[in-house]
Image (cartoon, rainbow, N blue to C red):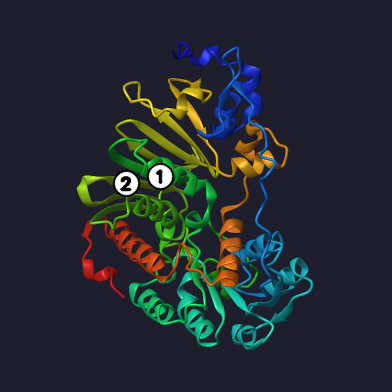
Amino acid sequence: MNSPVPTPADVNRRDFVKVGSFAAMIAALGGIPINGEEAKKNPDGTVAVPKADPNFKEKPPGPPVKFGVIGLGAQGREVIAQLGRLPNGPVAAVGDSYKSSIKRAAEAAPNAKTYDDYKAVLDDKDVQAVVIATPTHLHRQIALDAMQAGKHVYLEAPMAGSIDDARAIAKAASALPAKQIFQVGQQYRANPQHHHVLKFFRTGACGKTASARAQFNKKQSWRRASPNPDRERALNWRLYQETSLGLLGEIGIHPIDTVSWYLDALPTSVTGFGGILQWQDDRTVPDTIQAVIEYPGGVRMNYSATLASSFEGEHQIFHGSDAAILIRDNKGWMFKEVDAPLLGWEVYARKDDFLTDSGIALVANATKILAQGKKPAEAASDTDSPLKYALQAFVDHINEGTKPEAGWKEGFEATVTAVKSNEAIMAGSKIVFEPGWFKV
């Protein structure tokens, strides 16, 4: 039997102040990593701390894959940083048309050769794989040239800024030899946490899916300064309609792709709204948007994003008749309805009240965490960047010759959804998806 639901005043205020984030607050109120196989009770009824499996052995890394990184802005530098954390992803070359960007990247990857032309990166015989982290509207030709050069290609999401460009990339990728890997940077599809949550979702733990929603709230201008007016325009490509898919295409594509993946369905329509409500400058891309994306069966996803406020941050929720699942900061929780049937394993899980709800932590890699000698309670904060997981998966697919979770098909379908959703936002209208749009 659950304990009485506390009021906000019942929460220890000193602990609340120490927490500092929604996810950590859930952990402070008792959320712990758990899975049904390892939860056991002590004689006094409390949950026992699972012990490490002495037979657990982490998969050894495969041979190194030498990388070239094309596009050395903020995302390109983050790619270099995450590759540096891999045991088998050395950066052999970096390329950008802007000298200052090359200099900063060279400091982060001191052993890499530097080029001011992406074609020189592709001509480098030491480079086996490339990550294309240029602005979205520049993806098409670079991706086509990289595939033609025989490189393995990791292309940041979205694939392109238009359906025609994305289709050209997808066609070329679909014709590649099986051993030449093409992966799109839809990071959640390679993230163990999202795969872990998917298991609960697909086994019906949430009951009948009713709706989904996601948001991105962060007060920032998206504008970057440069003493060179021409360079400033190039740096701020995300602010202009001719070069950007806006908040939905550049940020929202990830949670929207997650809904399509979890539902195993393509959207049927989208209704969008947007406006420039905070940052009154020369931008033509809205700083605040909402989109309602409908899927077969009447399930709708509500996506909202704003650069005017940081309140409530970034998270995603799936609402079901038996439970809701919250994904935030690469962590997940399940909140069961009072009339939901017992699943068996959850009777052993520690449940703690969070205001009016009780959340069960869903944490991936529990066996690995235990094998490292850590307690389950540490798992809520012991997760790597989704980008690192995606890049590691890319390396593994290259070494093993296996199909990526986010290949050309998944990337193309997500890009079509993003392009049309952005069009709906810009027009303030509803767009019905045509099946032919999703065909390559």
Circles 2 and 1, Cβ within 8 Å, touching? The answer is yes
Q: Quadrant of residue 299?
A: top left
- Between residues 71 and 263, which one lies in front from this camera angle? 263
Mark 2 or mark 1, which has the lower sequence index? 1
Q: x and y percent of residue 203 in the render?
A: 37, 41
Label of residue 301 in the image: 2
Determine the residue positioned at 52% across, 33% down. 361
For this view, does 337 lie left or right of residue 222?
A: left
Q: Is residue 11 left or right of residue 204?
A: right
Judged left or right of residue 269, residue 234 is right
Q: Which amino acid type is shown beneath numbered disc 2?
A: Met
- Graded by Cα atoms within 10 Å as few (under 14), some (14 to 19) or many (20 or more), the crowding at tag 2 reads many
Q: Secondary structure at mark 2?
A: strand
Side (left or right) of 391 relative to 254: right
Image quadrant occupied by the C terminus: bottom left
Q: Which residue is disc 1 drawn over?
A: 214
Taking depth in this image into account, of 6 and 137 the one nearest to the observer is: 6
**Quadrant holding the N terminus:** top left
**Percent position of residue 274, x then y:** 34, 52
Taking 101 as reference, is 250 above or below it? above
Q: Residue at x 47, y 65 (%)?
A: 157
**In x, y percent, where is residue 413?**
35, 65
Q: Residue 270 got which mark? A: none
Q: Is residue 229 above or below residue 322?
A: below
- Residue 132 in view in this figure: no
Which three-letter amino acid code belongs to the residue tagged 1?
Ala
Q: Is residue 183 visible?
A: yes
